[in-house]
Image: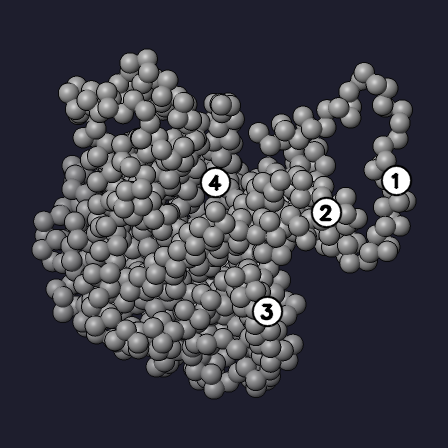
Amino acid sequence: MEQANSCGAAEAIQKKVRTDPKELIMKVVFVISAVVFIAAVLTICLFIFVRAYPAFREVGLFKFLFSSVWQPSQGKYGIGVMIVGSCYITAGALIIGVPIGFLTAVFMARYCPKPLYKVMKPMTNILAGIPSIVYGYFGLKVIVPFISENFGGYGNSILAASVVLGIMILPTIISVSENAIRAVPKSYFEGAVALGATKERAIFRTEVPAAKSGIMTSIILGLGRVIGETMAVVMICGNQVRFPTSVLDGVRTLTANVVLEMSYVESGSVHESALIATAAVLFVFILIITLLVALIRKKAK
Amino acid sequence: MQTQSITLGREPETSPEADLSKIVPINRQTFADKLRAYRKKPFSMALMLLVLLAAAITAAIVLWIVLYTLAQGIPNLKPSLFAWTYTTENVSLMPALINTLIVAGLSLLMAVPIGVFAAIFMVEYAKSTNVFVRIVRMAAETLSGIPSIVYGLFGMILFVRLLNWNYSLLGGAITMAIMILPLVMRTTEESLKAVPDSFREGSYALGAGKLRTIFVIILPSAMSGIISGVILALGRVVGETAALMYSAGTVARVPSSLLGNGRTLAVHMYMLANESFHVGEAWATAVVLIALVLVINGAAEFIGNKLKKEY
Amino acid sequence: MKKILVAILSIAMACGIGFAAMGCSEKGDIAKYTREEGSGTRDAFMELAGIETMSDEAAVSQGTDALMTAVAGNKKAIGYVSLGSVNSTVKKVKIENVEATAENIIAGTYKLSRPFNVAYKQATLDSNETLQELMEFIYSKEGQTIVSEDYVSETLETAPAYTVPETAPTASVKISGSTSVTPLMEKLVEAFCEASGVAASKIEINGNGSGAGMTDAASGTSDLGMASRAVKDSELAQGLTAKEIALDGIAIIVNTANPVENLTLANLKAIYTDEVKSWSDLGVQF
């Protein structure tokens, strides 16, 4: 499939492409589209890093990343708390979302009777289709009061955000893991059962290890969604700028920091640059995640 | 493909020629057998129960969220919510709905041709081992994972502040176009790559040029994948809040020109939720929003299945 | 790879459980909510209560309803919102034994009140007839009557009746700023369009926060900025003229299950600067 271009009749076609004006024009159009695409990509990257630079210069990269004081009115910019907050909430969402999602994927792939599957599959798709603002509102109205009622504290907490985000990543984890498990050749399962393994042992000791890379990919995709989630998080995570000491404490995430303050920053100020720098840090996180996915895929091949 | 081979493999068992139906297969297990087996292997049983529990939790969560939203929203779905103009009395969502369609339409208009053509270039023209192609693919993958708030920040500073367009539907649409471009490009690329080379070879062998091959043979074959990618992108635009709030603005009206300020449905819901008078209407808007996104996703699946071709 | 992930996850889980076990005992039980920086309500509240630095334990809610919902859902919560927005899901608290009502705000006995301001550049006003007409309407009897429905009007008694212009002006007006003022401004603009015959499509209102409104008006991004606090000197120095359109109280709200009836400004300051951490220190028993 990869060799679409190097197929046999190349010479004659190349000639035609070179001589026929229509072919030539369209080729130019295609090239231009590709160039526009890259231009858009480059613009965003350049824009973010160029506009973020003043903040790094003014505050110092190390201080910006690790200082825990964020007081724009006093000219103090440190996103240490936000990085920690994003990490905690991401970890929490994965702790909640991954086991449920993974086991549900196993259920969907290997246990679910067909009639039930026809109901379950659209149901998980609905979960994927609900806009994040609705999740945020649901969390604010239902989960936050529940937590403050039963566990005390503010309710707007790492726990609340983790629960909501854990729910949000379920569809990603379920569908990608399910496909990975289904892609394992049936003979693995049959072989294990023939050797006397129970169904569970066959699934969890032979099929799941074989589907490892797909499952890892699903987790990392979920991780990317959690780190980048904005509106749902800002409504329920409490947004305090200090290190949390319990899961019932609130904390501010990188995305919440941007959305809380971007409406009133002055154009061209260090504050604006600091917000863009926050976005740049997010960008780097996502880049690392993408590289991880690529690495896993390469290994799987 | 795979399921097919499995059914093939099983066919002799159920073949009607020999009267096999009366013979009890050796691997047939009664419920009691299963229970006995599980009693001997408590770990297996625990695992099975965990799997069932997880599935039940997932189902319960979906039902909980959907039913809760419906229960809160449907009693508030009044005809006045769909009036043509927004006033502080009826908090109509109609202008927001129209703005949503405008922004979605515009951004698709920009992103789809560029995304599809760029993908055609990458699959049909450039060599797949090309460094350039690899960089573009990597970039597309990274960009499709970038949080929408980053695009919003970009849109706000570039269009609203630097170009001085103020908050505008056009600025919002361009921001959205850039956001969905990688998604459209990636899905198109994948579906083009899935078209077998024999199609191309056959077309060339019959004397068709490259262009004719692409537009008459390859694109129609890849159409289902492309369309479902486009519709997924549409769903992303419709559900987007943060990025649009700061690029397209929050005015509850259909602006007279594309350079005017207007809120989309998701932003409308956020604004309603943010002032305490309209909690019920916010839930009603949530219902409309979910319905819209579900219709769009359903359409993607339907078209995808309808146009799917087996090679 | 898998082992590393498992290790990370288990460490994270251990940390989480550790955190939870440490509990919030030394933190006290007052759950205090505040608005985001750049909110006019927050600035006005901090100034009136004499708070210099807000405690960083206070949870930040973006917007009035987000805050009110949070307080309505948490028995130990306290927060502050625009008086005009308070609904029955939460309970208003007396300040220095004075109830938050329009009369008390006019009389000056309710301490937590702040002006709603609009700000514009004189040159913009001079060149924009619609804006002049709108300003005239806001200060007329009709305009101030609308103000007095949910907010406090100081000039209702003396305001002149609105005179309808012979031909409706056609210039368009962009308004932006405080989310607290936006609901009031929407109502005013609606009534204004009806009274003067100006097409509703000529005026657009964008709620993006007091700070943003002032920045917009100064830079010309919008014609009229709204602020739910006093306009700062640094903003006036950018060539803005500020005018007060209404008075609004800041209501201190608690959960309906909270028995507290009265708080002093000193209490508020102590709560929001972490000097007092639990309700029992204020003599409130649940």
Q: Amino acid at mark 4?
A: Leu
**How many neighbours does mark 2 have within 10 angstroms: few (below 14), some (14-19), or many (20 or more)?**
some
Residue placed under numbered mark 2 in the picture? A192
Name the residue tied to disc 4. Answer: B289
| Type of amino acid at the residue the image marks with label 2 | Ala
Question: Which chain letter matches label 4?
Answer: B
Which of pointers 4 and 1 lies earlier in the amino acid sequence?
Answer: 1
Q: Could you say which quadrant of the image residue C130 lies in?
A: top left
User: Label 2 vs label 4: CA separation?
Assistant: 47 Å
Percent coordinates x, y for residue B290 in the rendering: 51, 40
The crowding category of the residue bearing disc 4, from other C-alpha atoms within 10 Å (few below 14, some 14 to 19, many at least 20), is: many
Q: Write down the residue under mark 3.
A: C10
Is B40 situated left or right of B84 in this image? Answer: right
Residue B30 — which label? 1
Q: Is residue B117 above or below residue A175?
A: above
Q: Are marks 4 and 1 on the same chain?
A: yes
For residue C235, what is the image quadrant?
A: bottom left
Marks 3 and 2: which is nearer the front?
A: 2
Query: Which residue shows up at 62% across the image and 40% down it?
Result: A185
Name the residue located 72 percent from the left edge and 28 percent from the top edge: B10
Q: Is residue C267 above or below residue B286?
A: below
- Mark 1 or 3, which is nearer the eye? 1
Query: Numbered disc 1: what chain?
Result: B
> Mark 1: which amino acid?
Thr
Instruction: Estimate the spatial distance between the alpha carbons at disc 3 and disc 2, rounded to whole Å.
Output: 30 Å
Secondary structure category for the residue under label 4: helix
Residue A256, placed above or below residue C143: below
Residues at circles 1 and 3 in contact by the CB criterion of under 8 Å = no
Helix, strand or loop at mark 3: helix
Q: Residues within 10 Å of mark 3 (few under 14, many from 20)?
A: few
